[in-house]
Image: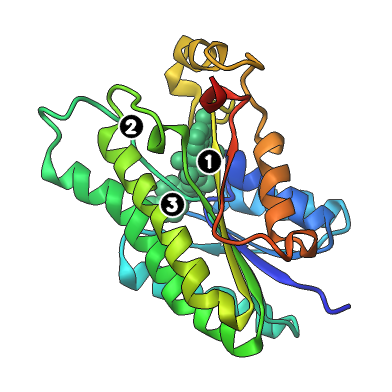
Amino acid sequence: METRTALVTGSTSGIGRATALKLARDGVRVVVSGRNAQRGLEVVEQIRAEGGEAHFVAADLRDAQTAADLAAKATKVAESAGGTLDILVNNAATGSGGPTEGTIEATFDAVLGTNLKAPFYLVANLAPAMAARGGGAIVNVSTLAADVALPGLAVYGAGKAALELLTKSWAAEFGPAGVRVNCVRPGPTRTPGSEALGDFLQQLAAQAPLGFVADPADIAAAIAFLVSDEARFVTGVTLDVNGGRTAV
Ligand SMILES: NC(=O)c1ccc[n+]([C@@H]2O[C@H](COP(=O)([O-])OP(=O)(O)OC[C@H]3O[C@@H](n4cnc5c(N)ncnc54)[C@H](OP(=O)(O)O)[C@@H]3O)[C@@H](O)[C@H]2O)c1
């Protein structure tokens, strides 16, 4: 079987990094991406040391243009290696949170630019080629904060909730051409990005039946399933990976 190529945004750290490693272990060629080239190259090196294939493409995802540039570069990487860009994981995100009052417009625009507009234009640039080839898989990474109200995460949660709706829209739009689009909605997960939350992360985890903070690999496993052929009848879903937090 031909090696599939995946673009994983925000794979220099945390959940994206774990996803890149997992997909590579599953035999997928991975385009690692993020702003920090040093950390990106470390991920590439680790994948290669394990016998996998990976390439780094730097990107600061903010808007339609930066998304289009990354889509073009990632496609070129796939084609140079004799493949096609078959998988997209929209994982990169930003958002430190804060009360609604006092949220300046620049923050609002920056959070939605990276978390919503960039994924939209990555799909707009990559899904049509997948559809023309008759197959592909896309996973969007959402958050518990898109489903339940978490104080201080209004803008971040709203952008991710919109991404969940886009997941269904795209499943309907590209499904007839064989492209599946799903979403993973992680609960509290220990990553460099969530470190700043301190004790709040464990307090949040304690509200769920399983009670523990996830490892990035727990989320990566769900993403890897959804992009795999094992999930060929699954599209348009948002999968909670949160220790049961929304079951109670
Ligand atoms: N950790 C949690 O508890 C948790 C819970 C629910 C949902 N999530 C979601 O899971 C995903 C990953 O989170 P994480 O905790 O793994 O975060 P993280 O450790 O902070 O990693 C974030 C990644 O996104 C990249 N990124 C941020 N801004 C970017 C930009 N403007 N352009 C390109 N890349 C950018 C970062 O790359 P550079 O630093 O190299 O730019 C990094 O690779 C996010 O979508 C987040 O919303 C996380």
Residue 164, numbered circle: 3
Three-letter amino acid code at the position of disc 2: Ser
Residue 185, numbered circle: 1
Three-letter amino acid code at the position of disc 3: Glu
Q: How is the image coloured?
A: rainbow
Q: Residue at x 47, y 14 (%)?
A: 198
Is residue 45 visible from the viewing direction of this image?
A: no
Specify the quadrant of the image occupied by residue 227.
Answer: bottom right
Front: mark 2 or 3: 3
Q: Residue at x 59, y 29 (%)?
A: 242
Specify the quadrant of the image occupied by residue 89.
Answer: bottom right
Which comes before the other along the chain, label 2 or label 3?
A: 2
Q: Secondary structure at mark 2?
A: loop
Q: Is mark 1 within 8 Å of ligand 1?
A: yes
Residue 156 position, x and y percent, is 32, 39
Residue 246, numbered circle: none
Q: Secondary structure at mark 3?
A: helix
Do the residues under discs 3 and 1 have CB atoms within 8 angstroms?
Answer: yes
Which comes before the other along the chain, label 2 or label 1?
A: 2
Estimate the spatial distance between the alpha carbons at disc 2 and disc 3, rounded to whole Å: 20 Å
Is residue 93 visible from the viewing direction of this image?
A: yes
- The residue closer to the viewer here, 111 or 42, is 111
Residue 112 position, x and y percent, is 29, 51
The residue where tag 2 is placed is 96
Q: Residue at x 64, y 54 (%)?
A: 41
How many circles with numbers are drawn on the protein? 3
Three-letter amino acid code at the position of disc 1: Arg
Residue 138 position, x and y percent, is 58, 64
